[in-house]
Each structure stands twice: as structure tokens, then as C-alpha cells.
Image (cartoon, grey):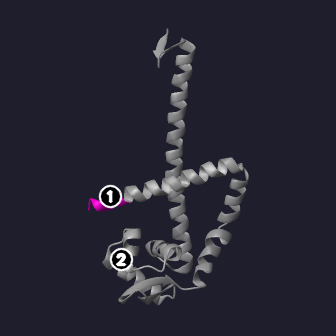
Amino acid sequence: MNLVLFGRRMSSNEVVTARDAGRERRRLTRAIKESLRDTGAQLSRLNHEVGGRVNIRTSDLECLDQIGREGPLSPTSLARLTGQHPATLTGILDRLERDGWIARDRDPDDRRGVVVRAERGRGAEILRLFLVESGMSPALDEILNGYSEADLEVIADFLRRTAIAGRVAADRLSATR
């Protein structure tokens, strides 16, 4: 059997090899997508466990993480970032403020507005749980030590692009509500 591909005649062995390579690529792609789903589930479980240790709901912990990474920010910006309804977000912010995790301050650019910031020092408690007590940081270090710098660049790029794709997908679904 001969097949002409891109103006070149391919032998039957080349056709079988190309077909096998396509199957292997589909298998690997499927395995990566399933691993991402499992990673998401396990990280969600870890968030739940950490939140339980510091008596914070998972949705509150996600908001606190965004405030810590992006803050200070307005409640409106936080609602957009987290996908929370503004009324729900008010309850989350009330709980976080009551328990000393965040503070609400007047917006320096607009005295009528409010910005939310994480309280200094409280985040260390959560980081200790995530990175030390859970064993996650040493486990990640051990995993990453098995990769070359070139591999790490590819992994970092993949994860960055995956996070962007996730954000775009969430924004797309949010826009159709």
C-alpha cells in the first residue's frame, strides 16, 4: 500500500508508523487532560482541608488567595476575579474581616470606594499549612528535581497557558449567565 502525502509517496510501514504516532498523541493528550482533572480535584480537597484547619470556607479561602495575590482591590474587582455574586461576596468579606484575615480601607484614588487587603501576618499561617504541614512543598520539590531546566520551562509554560485557558473558559461561561 502506498499513500501520497504532501506530494510524497509513503510506504505502508510509514503509514502504520504515522497512524500509531497519532494514536499515541491522542492517548497522551487524554491522559494529560485526565491528570489535570485529578489535579484540580486533589487541590480542591487540599484547599478544603486547609480551610478546615483555619476555620475558613473554601470559597472564602479562594477569595483570600486572590486578595493576597492581586490586592488590594475593590470588591467589584474581586467579584469579577472569583466569579462570586456581589451579595455573596459581601458575606465572604464580612466573615474574613470579622476573623481578622482582611481589612477594608478607603480607596486612596476614590474616597467613596473601598479596597480590600489581606492582613499582614495571617497569610503565613495558611502558607505553613499548604507548604509545610501538608508536605506539599517538599513533594513538589522532589518532583521538580527530576526535570531538567528545559523540561521545567515547558511545564511552566504549559501551566501558565492552562491557567489562561481556564480563565477564558470561566469568563466565557460567566458572560452567558
Label 2, label 1: how far apart the Cα atoms are: 18 Å
As shown in the figure, which amino acid type bears the numbered disc 2?
Answer: Thr
Q: Position of residue 9 (x, y in %)?
A: 51, 12
Span of residues in magenta: 171-177
Q: How many marks?
A: 2
- Of marks 2 and 1, which one's residue comes earlier in the chain? 2
Residue 84 appears at what percent x and percent y? 36, 71
Residue situated furthest front in the rendering: 109
Classified by dominant secondary structure, the portion drawn in magenta counts as helix
Q: Position of residue 156 (x, y in %)?
A: 60, 54
Contact flag, marks 2 and 1 (Cβ < 8 Å)? no
Of discs 2 and 1, which sits in the foreground?
2
The residue to which callout 1 is attached is 173
Residue 71 falls inside the magenta stretch? no
**Residue at position x 40%, y 80% in the image:** 74
Residue 118 horizontal/vertical position (percent): 52, 82
Q: Secondary structure at mark 2?
A: helix
Disc 1 crowd rating (10 Å Cα; few below 14, some 14-19, many 20+) is few
Residue at the image position 55 percent from the left and 50 percent from the top: 158
In the picture, the disc for residue 76 is: 2
Say left or right for 17 vs 112. right
The image quarter in which residue 169 lies? bottom left
* Helix, strand or loop under label 1: helix
Quadrant assignment for the C terminus: bottom left
